[in-house]
């Protein structure tokens, strides 16, 4: 499967034999380096935040910087 | 076979198989209702919508009721408390005290973008829901400046303020002026490191006429946090 990962203005495309999980995408060092995200992020599919165990069936997901809260 | 559907500029819709062994496109007949729905969901950007003072306003139309307006700033107005540190005047961002307006001149390699999400709805009015401040480098990487009223995703804490207008530009101008003139306090200082970065980035020298920006010894991107959100795609960059 072909998956497009979006982060802000940047895009990366990867091919997977099986759909990756949200946690795997978040932890992917190659993607982190290419797209520039860190630990403080969330992954959304069609605008809905997903948990780390969720599979990403494609065709695209969005990784966003997670907003903090006021103390 | 996986495929992608492409809406061409001339209005035709073509289906293009993704498999590398198959080349070419197949034009397909699409009902006008489907074309209309596709066009409705296409995000459209206008980079030169009009002027707000001497700033060019850009606009992104997400759908019939959701818009993003933005301007690129040449300087950042900080309405804040100031402390003296040797020869420098540095924003202390105290919640109370004597507030002054200082104009921070942005570095030459920074594009500073102020944007707002504006919705059209109740009583035919435009209302600002969120506004943002992004610092963008020449490679189009986005950052959040170490300012105490910015969330990690670059949206600005505006407290209870709600901005609206009879027109989209009127609403955008009101939120722009409101944020520009608002006090910067410390509601979102979430760690000592971020605060220390602000002390190194925003430095001024007092002159007879006001405050001159002193360039930071470290590059601004090293003192800021990288950010990536879908909102950036609506900023007509």
Image (spheres, helix red, strand yellow):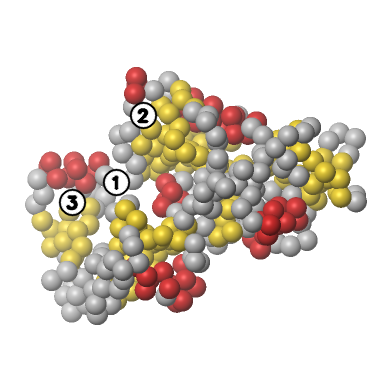
**Element under label 2?**
strand
Which mark, by number, is residue B120?
Answer: 2
Tell which circle, 1 or 2, labels the residue nearer the N-terminal end: 1
Tell which circle, 3 or 1, labels the residue nearer the N-terminal end: 3
Closest to the observer, B214 or B111: B214
The answer to whether marks 3 and 2 sit on the same chain is yes
Report crowding for label 3: few under 14, some 14 to 19, many 20 or more residues within 10 A (C-alpha): few
The subunit letter for the residue under badge 2 reads B
**Element under label 3?**
loop
Tell which circle, 3 or 2, labels the residue nearer the N-terminal end: 3
Q: Tell me the residue at 24%/53% (across/down).
A: B8
Q: Please indicate, yes or no, whether residue A42 appears anywhere in the rendered image.
A: yes
For the residues labelled 3 and 2, the Cα–Cα distance comes to 31 Å
Closest to the observer, B117 or A40: A40
Q: Tell me the residue at 47%/57% (across/down).
A: A65
Q: Are marks 3 and 1 in contact (CB under 8 Å)?
A: no
Q: Which residue position is annotated with label 1?
A: B42
The subunit letter for the residue under badge 3 reads B
Tell me if residue A62 comes above or below residue B86 in the rendering: below
Closest to the observer, B110 or A17: A17
Q: Nearer the viewer, mark 3 or mark 2?
A: 2
Q: Nearer the viewer, mark 3 or mark 1?
A: 1
* Percent x, y of residue B78: 70, 39
Q: Please indicate, yes or no, whether residue B220 appears anywhere in the rendered image.
A: no
């Amino acid at each position: 499967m072909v998956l497009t990962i979006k982060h802000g203005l940047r895009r990366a495309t990867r091919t997977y034999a099986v759909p990756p999980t949200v946690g795997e995408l978040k932890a992917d060092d190659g993607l982190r380096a290419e797209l520039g995200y860190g630990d403080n992020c969330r992954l959304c599919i069609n605008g809905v935040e997903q948990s780390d165990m969720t599979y990403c069936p494609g065709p695209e997901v969005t990784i966003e910087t997670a907003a903090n809260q006021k103390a | 076979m996986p495929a992608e559907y492409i809406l061409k500029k001339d209005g035709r819709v073509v289906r293009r198989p993704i498999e590398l062994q198959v080349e070419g496109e197949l034009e397909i007949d699409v009902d006008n209702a489907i074309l209309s729905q596709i066009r409705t969901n296409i995000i459209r950007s206008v980079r030169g919508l009009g002027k707000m003072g001497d700033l060019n306003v850009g606009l992104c139309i997400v759908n019939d009721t959701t818009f993003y307006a933005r301007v690129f700033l040449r300087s950042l107005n900080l309405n804040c408390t100031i402390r003296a540190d040797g020869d420098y005047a540095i924003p202390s961002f105290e919640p109370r005290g004597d507030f002054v307006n200082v104009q921070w001149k942005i570095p030459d390699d920074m594009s500073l973008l102020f944007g707002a999400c504006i919705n059209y709805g109740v009583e035919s009015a435009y209302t600002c829901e969120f506004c943002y401040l992004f610092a963008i480098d020449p490679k189009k990487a986005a950052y959040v400046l170490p300012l105490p009223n910015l969330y990690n995703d670059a949206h600005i804490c505006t407290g209870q303020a709600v901005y609206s207008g009879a027109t989209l530009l009127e609403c955008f101008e009101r939120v722009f002026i409101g944020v520009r003139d608002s006090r910067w306090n410390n509601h979102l200082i979430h760690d000592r490191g971020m605060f220390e970065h602000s002390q190194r980035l925003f430095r001024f020298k007092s002159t007879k006429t006001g405050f001159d920006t002193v360039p930071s010894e470290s590059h601004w991107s090293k003192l800021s946090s990288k950010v990536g959100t879908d909102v950036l795609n609506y900023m007509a960059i």
